[in-house]
Amino acid sequence: MKTTLQRIGMILFMTGFFFSVWAQEMEVSGTVYDAQGKSPLIGVTVMVKGTQKGTVTDINGRYRIKAEKGNTLTFSYIGYLIQEIKVKKLQLDVYLKQDEATLDEVVVVAFGTQKKNAVAGSVMRVADQSYYLPSVIFPYPREVNTEEYEAFKENRFLSAIQHPLSTFSLDVDGASYSNIRRMINQGQMPSKDVVRVEEIVNYFNYDYPQPSDGYPVRIVTETAVCPWNKKHNMVRIGVKAKEIPSETLPVSNFVFLLDVSGSMFSANKLPLVKASMKLLVNNLRPKDRVAIVTYAGAAGEVLPSTSASDKQKIMEALDNLQAGGSTAGGAGIQLAYKIAEKNLVKGGNNRVILCTDGDFNVGVSSPTELESLIESKRKSGVFLTVLGYGMGNYKDNKLQTLAQKGNGNHAYIDNLQEANKVLVNEFGGTMYAVAKDVKLQVEFNPNFVNAYRLIGYESRLLNDEDFNDDTKDAGELGAGHTVTALYEIVPVGVNVPVGSVDKLKYQQTKNDVSLPKFADSKELLTVKLRYKEPDKDVSRKLEVPVLANRMNLNASQDFNFAMAAAMFGQ
């Protein structure tokens, strides 16, 4: 009898143990492939059905997600059939089949796309017969497009006599290009204010020579005939920052500032943020450190500063993030800088990495308030990287303000390939500054230049006197970065496409013989560049003249590409 009771007790214990193990969370991983070509699919949304847990596949089609045995995972990707699979093992590879109905018929209406969150009946054609599928209603409403962009006026031609100087802050950002790409891929026509031509040009890398003589930057120039007006000329000014091998970069003190508000719920927001940050974490060295701050209705530290040698701990903190609540971005910024300053590495790379859609709506939230807040942090020794995500409510104007006023840079992440480009391939340029407050000033010689036009940089223009003022903020240059500025030149003797004014009563006009003569110089223009070292407050100046007789009949491949990119943007 006793033996029988012991056996029954053991059976009950093992049964309870079995069910407790069954119910425990485990990490499921695998690769998602195209069923036809057997190639990995990047950016597939993987969700635990009935929950808010989700992730996206990386550049190798890999995913990792926490689930319980018996849960159902859903795999969804545009152009493919949704697949649902029950969790039965830790390793789960998936092969998605193309959705013939979706691929068969694409409807584009007024440069817009119908979002998949409210399909209004679609048609599937098979053997010349039509089958009408029922409407599908999803449990959340269609989003209204409330994206915001800073308005600007395109630069006009200026007289070289009346405006001999052109001054602006360098801009290494490429956010506009990837945002435009996202819109075009969705069948949308980008509005005028979305298109920043300099960011289209600078999205691409150019083959500029390395700096020499101990300088962190180098200026290169080239001239050619303007491709869209043969009577005009083009001048390319390139700036190359020194390259630093990843293994010799200073120790990094990163604070991930992640928006986990309700607006970040969709797959191209928080799940993509988490996947992006994992790419970055995988690229860090053991001596680097990461802290994680999140904000929704309030801000909080979810991971204290942690050595990158403990990547699993950092990954788990990212995996546990969920979206919900309002957006107290200002409070998040203040807390992130406080933690970055607390763990400041002297002579190191101290940086806050903000990931958000920019839709701040609690506390400090307007562009003016954000500008004041971020300017107060500029002298802390902490730099800023702003990564924009999502669509529909994207606030580009606020993110531009933060990046420009906070010793920062700005990128738009529309997919995991872009995240890999910005955070892995261009890690040094994105995350480590070799020069800050970088300004350019070009002086034109009226002997050869009738008028000129700077292509792009409308939001980066400075007053001429700001060039020598070290208190004026300007752009930063990261390790290995290349920056390009293009000028369209109207030579002397060619009609100037500028307006005219009445003759002045109180000043001498250009016909007066008493006016000073132009200098007898064979130079077309002079390029001046000012920069500060990352830990210094006093600038240094470089100066390079461009001769008037250096016009190239055959422009370099890089120059032709830059001009083509500018034409696309204009």
Image: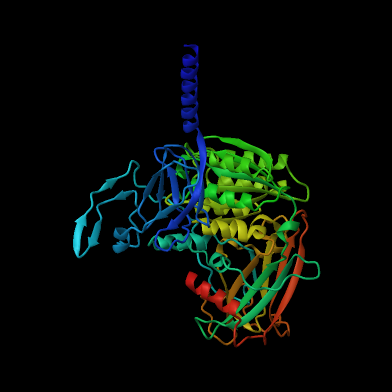
Q: Nearer the viewer, residue 109 or 285?
A: 285
Q: Nearer the viewer, residue 188 or 424?
A: 424
Toward the top, the furthest residue is 1
Can you see residue 190? no
The residue positioned 47% from the left and 22% from the top of the image is: 11
Q: Position of residue 158 (x, y in %)?
A: 57, 74
Can you see residue 525? yes
Above or below for 269 versus 443: above
- What is the quadrant of residue 477 in the picture? bottom right
From the viewer's perspective, tell me whether residue 128 is left or right of residue 377.
left
Q: Position of residue 351 (x, y in %)?
A: 67, 49
Q: Nearer the viewer, residue 315 or 122?
A: 315
Toward the left, the furthest residue is 129
Toward the right, the furthest residue is 213
Above or below for 491 versus 191: below
Q: Position of residue 101 (x, y in %)?
A: 29, 59
- What is the quadrant of residue 488 in the picture? bottom right
Q: Nearer the viewer, residue 358 or 413?
A: 413
Number of labels in the image equals: 0
- Color encoding of the figure: rainbow
From the viewer's perspective, tell me whether residue 359 is left or right of residue 225.
left
Q: Position of residue 424 (x, y in %)?
A: 61, 57
The residue positioned 77% from the left and 54% from the top of the image is: 537
